[in-house]
């Protein structure tokens, strides 16, 4: 477990790795972070010659697992799979116990994926986004919309959508994207913002209906689904990214080796094919470029969180 790794004596950079490496995914198995971490971890394990295990530590919008990772020894044996929601977590969680930009060293991005607003057609009869908005305005609060958890990107998306569309929805938070999607498919909730990667197959099968892709352009996995802007909600974009981070003060030599292994994994034919199937854009960039991107993201999403007036205890 990650706590045991954190208690271990720091390893010298020249010796790393000599034992199993743990990647903390601060969300449940089956969610977006987990889905992208596992194939990369398998490839990285081959490159470094040691096992890489996924340690799912979900709760409180990803802050539970992240707080475990921030306390780990900076020796390369406990890493964190982060996503968009963690960069603004200190803004909405006063007791988060970490400052993402200050406490973590960015290693490498995995990719970026847009969201789609989807409905269960057995619960909501809406041919398009305009009809969905009309239904929501006629009966404020009558539509249940799920999120991956309080304070997550999907939670902020609901608030922004309500503001941009003039609607009032009933927010139903879950402990991760996977259980939210399960309930959406089962008809327990009527709508949700879901990663295109996770929902495209269900849309094609007819189990769910996508009303809009929340991005600047249409997505190759859902080419017939308009963007939110095309569907009438201007300046509404929501994409998420996934990447790998280490506790600050982890030696550069270790970070460089992990970065190279991740880049190698992302460049492999099987991972590129899998990412294409999931609609993810592969990111091959330097550690410095990724760090600059994280700084910009933290500033942008913190503004969005403050504007949405989301505060968690």
Image (tube, helix red, strand yellow):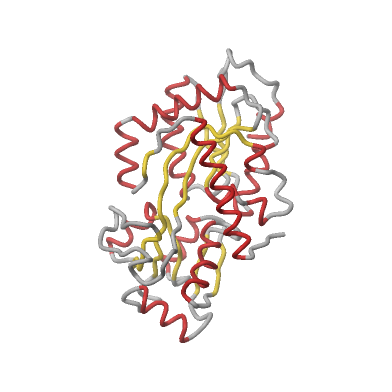
Q: Which of 299 and 27 is in front in this view?
A: 299
Compared across the picture, whether 185 is left or right of 145 comes to left
Figure quadrant of residue 214: bottom left
Image: 97 above or below 226: above
Q: Which quadrant of the rendered structure holds the C terminus?
A: bottom right
Image: 278 above or below 215: above
Figure quadrant of residue 101: top right
Q: Nearer the viewer, residue 138 or 64?
A: 138
Q: Nearer the viewer, residue 223 or 77?
A: 223
Image: 221 above or below 121: above
Among all residues in the image, which is located at the extreme top?
14
Kindly identify the residue that appears in the image at 38 percent across and 66 percent down. 228
Figure quadrant of residue 11: top right
Compared across the picture, whether 282 is left or right of 52 comes to left
- Residue 246 position, x and y percent, is 59, 32
Compared across the picture, whether 311 is left or right of 76 comes to right
Kindly identify the residue that appears in the image at 50 percent across and 58 percent down. 179
């Amino acid at each position: 477990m990650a706590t045991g790794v954190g208690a271990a004596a720091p390893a010298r950079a020249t010796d790393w790795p000599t034992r199993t490496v743990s990647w903390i995914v601060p969300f449940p198995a089956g969610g977006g972070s987990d889905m992208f971490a596992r194939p990369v971890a398998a490839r990285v394990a081959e490159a470094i010659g040691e096992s890489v295990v996924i340690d799912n530590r979900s709760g409180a919008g990803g802050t539970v697992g992240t707080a475990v990772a921030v306390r780990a020894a900076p020796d390369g044996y406990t890493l964190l799979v982060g996503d968009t929601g963690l960069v603004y977590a200190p803004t909405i969680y006063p007791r988060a116990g970490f400052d993402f930009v200050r406490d973590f060293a960015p290693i490498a991005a995995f990719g970026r994926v847009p969201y789609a607003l989807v409905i269960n057609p057995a619960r909501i009869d809406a041919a398009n986004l305009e009809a969905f908005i009309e239904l929501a305005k006629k009966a404020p609060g009558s539509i249940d919309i799920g999120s991956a958890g309080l304070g997550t990107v999907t939670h902020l998306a609901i608030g922004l959508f309500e503001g941009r569309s003039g609607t009032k929805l009933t927010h139903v938070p879950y402990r991760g994207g996977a259980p939210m999607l399960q309930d959406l498919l089962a008809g327990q909730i009527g709508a949700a913002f879901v990663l295109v990667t996770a929902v495209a197959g269900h849309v094609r099968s007819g189990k769910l209906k996508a009303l809009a892709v929340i991005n600047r352009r249409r997505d190759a996995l859902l080419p017939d689904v308009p963007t939110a802007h095309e569907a009438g909600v201007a300046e509404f974009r929501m994409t998420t990214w996934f990447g790998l981070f280490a506790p600050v003060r982890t030696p550069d030599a270790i970070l460089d080796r992990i970065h190279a292994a991740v880049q190698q994994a992302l460049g492999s034919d099987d991972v590129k094919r899998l990412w294409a199937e999931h609609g993810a854009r592969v990111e091959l960039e330097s550690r410095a470029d990724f760090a600059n991107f994280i700084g910009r993201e933290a500033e942008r999403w913190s503004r969005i969180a403050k504007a949405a007036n989301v505060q968690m205890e």
